[in-house]
Image (cartoon, rainbow, N blue to C red):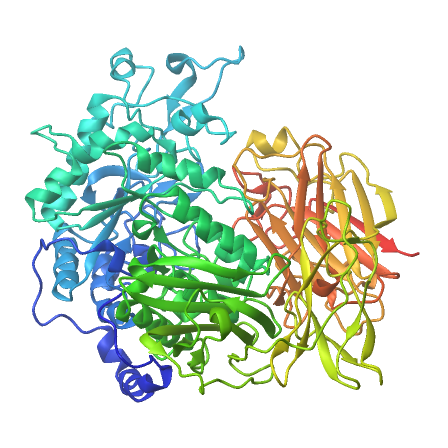
Amino acid sequence: MQASQVPVPFRRGMLAFALALVAATAGVAAQAAPTQPGALHVPSPDWRDQVIYFLMIDRFDDAQLGNNDQGVDEYDPTDPSHYSGGDIQGITRRLDYIKSLGATAVWITPPVANQWWNPRGSYSGYHGYWASDFGAVDAHYGTLADYQALSRALHGRGMYLVQDVVVNHVADYLDCKPGDDGALDPGRDCSVRADARGRTAPVQSPFDRNDARNPEQRAEAIYHWTPEIIDFTERRQELDFALAGLDDLDTENPNVRDALRASYGHWIREVGVDAFRVDTAFHVPADFFPDFLHSDDAAAPGMTRVAAATGHDDFLSFGEGFGSDKPFDDTQARKLDSYMRVPGGLPSMINFPLYGSLGDVFARGRPTAELRHRIESMLALHADPHRMPSFIDNHDVDRFLAGSDGAGLRQALLAMLTLPGIPVIYYGTEQGFSERRASMFARGVGSGGRDHFDIGAPLYRYLQDAIALRRDHKLFSRGTPTVLAADPAGAGAIAWRTDHDGNAALVVLNSADHPALLDHLDTGLPAGTRLQGLFGIDDAPADLVAGADGEVTLVLPSRSGQVWQVERGGVASESESTSAVPPGSSSTSTTATASSVLTIAPLQTQESGDPPTLTGNLELAGTVHPGQTFQLVVDGNLAAATAVRADADGRWHATVRTDGMTDPAIEHRVVAFDPTSAHTSPARPFRVALDWRLRVDQPDPHGDDTGPTGNYSYPLDPGWRDLHPADIERVRVWTAGGALRFELTLPGISTGWNPANGFDRVAFTAYLQLPGVDGGATAMPQQHADLPDGMHWHRRLRAHGWSNALFGFDGAGTTDEGTPVTPGAAIDVDAVARTITFTLPATALGTPDSLAGAKLHVTTWDYDSGYRPLAPEAGPVTFGGGETGDPRVMDAATVDLQY
């Protein structure tokens, strides 16, 4: 994260020669062993200043081939459901690779002994979250000595070890189903089942006492003996039921608490672990954690007491609370905060809401005002956001690059690294991974048959620079950001000033695919303040001088990110000013104080004084110098600016399209802009309520959610089978100019998994053929099918409970989804009406004048890091009735837009 400030701008080019030398010795550096192992126990760092590299042990590197296959058919490096072979020694030999990136800590998935193969789910415990013994190292990963060696190697490099821990559950040995009367009697309705090793319980006491049919074990109440969670919004199910079929521990039982403290204190004491990430914290009562962390039990003290005895004065435990908030909503953020507000409870939680907003803005083209809200919200809600880990993707969600591109990824990383929080880099991000749990080593699943430890990779080098920016300037890890500007209408500019201990920096990003005008940005700095170009995603920006009233006007390149450092005491003289530069250059500022002669006639306001609401195009008029040329810029979009030339009297009139503006609640702004002088007129606000015309109202047969053969069946989970969430019953389509809105009616809408988009257990993939557009693709990527009736698609929308991605057809094929396009769709769910509505502005579709003659093909399935599998027999999360290579479509509807 951060060290002392440097007096000169950080410029990426300065590292080129050094990086070239490092790249030439990549193979040696990546596997170098420490010459002097460090201590097992070291003092705690200031966690605000750390950058964490998060890796899955099984998928990172395999240094010991002999421990890969433990003999129960759990190892198959060609199958993502099996072990691939990564181990602890593999991590140790790659520490120089991680340190060179700039990371200062390594977070590993649970290294504890796991259930190796679950016959019921046909899945292995390669991930580490299915414990059979919380106190032993899994044989696939190595030995206690290997783990101690990793700790010493990290500490010898000035780095720290973070272990993932689970307190909510163990592996899946129990089968609990309510009886015919609807009630669940554990002694009657719960049984145990054997895993691939013949085990029916964990091997560790007291967790081996899991058979509710045994009165003595039932009385011990180590488990809750409950069925699987169906509705995550019901608090009792969230706390006491089985998550994904995993046996839920009664964490209010003193014997369970004692055993968990003893187990996890062991890793601090014997290995020198420096911090814990606590899995599934929301599934454990918040008042469990004061005991877990601070118990004074002499036999099994709390974690902070064990850590203090080994020299850790700030042992950090941060919890996972899975759940992102909808735009401008703080429900999940408040739930996170409630866990940190319990006296003596978890001091930190992973910042899931920030993750959601970073993805929405930089991957899906949502308004940057949504990120503004999230930044301001986390500062207001949380007592110490600087110690909350932040991330852009991880092992439980889609990779950022699964639905976006490298430009958006670089912006999201820069934003994360310049905002409060402990940045977490998920392994493979630096190598451009798009598959959620692919392997870094050549023999592992998803690796493509090659190693991925390339320190010359573009994203690796970019992250080196971006992390160095944070680590070299502590104001990014300790400072407080003040958001200065954001776009409420769509992708575009966002700017914040960060202040700490007399230092300040300005961070400005443009999330749009077009140059953006950021006019009259009030920096909050004195007039004449110098700002030194410090960092740029492409190049370090030119220096700035704040103009009158501390304002600057910037022309931001598309997908850019720029950082300036405020010079302490640096105020320009009156004779100094900076000149404007045209769009496409890195930036422009002006110190001019004279008012621009550009004017736009006031738009007629409503009686309430609110801006006018338009139902058609925007008509504008005004006055300038006779014959003057300028641009009308709406919401900062310079690519769509309307060129205007005044007549001989200086009068002008222009029409601006509005079918890219689909949300009537958003206040838009238009300015007149002279690129030569960088003068802008005062902004005129307005709103748009498009005149949507219903074009199609088409019923779809009820009960035809059985696939193309009529033989498909849902996964066994009753959440699918009871509701039939993939059965399309009706399609309605509206248009407004080149904008599209379509609504799907379903038998019901499931929200049991608390999905961010308002629905789950179904994914919609919609294919749009645009009128009069050449080219297009016929393959339905990853669905093992082609579009019907010779249809070609130009836009493809894929959305499920946690994803919303739009693609163009360039590069699309049977496996490749195409080229990401922004903005994505707006999604509205009406559970009462049983409808889900998707709205796409004309700008997302290439700005067509009309959609007359377009075709829309909508399909249903479900999605989890890929379309869920299909097999002859349905499984817990597998669709049945077909072969692996058959089409992954439960229901489909095609509509023609003829009007």
Residue 565 placement: quadrant: bottom left
Residue 318 visible in image: yes
Across and down, in percent, residue 65 comes to 25, 62
From the viewer's side, name the closer residue of 85 and 328: 328
Residue drawn at 17 percent across, 59 percent down: 150
Residue 899 placement: quadrant: bottom right
Q: Is residue 359 above or below residue 750?
A: below
From the viewer's side, name the closer residue of 673 and 727: 673
- Judge from the rendering whether residue 93 lies leftward or rightward of residue 363; answer left or right: left
- Quarter of the figure that contains the N terminus: bottom left
Residue drawn at 10 percent across, 47 percent down: 270
From the viewer's side, name the closer residue of 168 and 874: 168
- Judge from the rendering whether residue 86 lies leftward or rightward of residue 37; answer left or right: right
Across and down, in percent, residue 275 comes to 22, 48
Residue 185 placement: quadrant: top left
Across and down, in percent, residue 782 comes to 61, 58
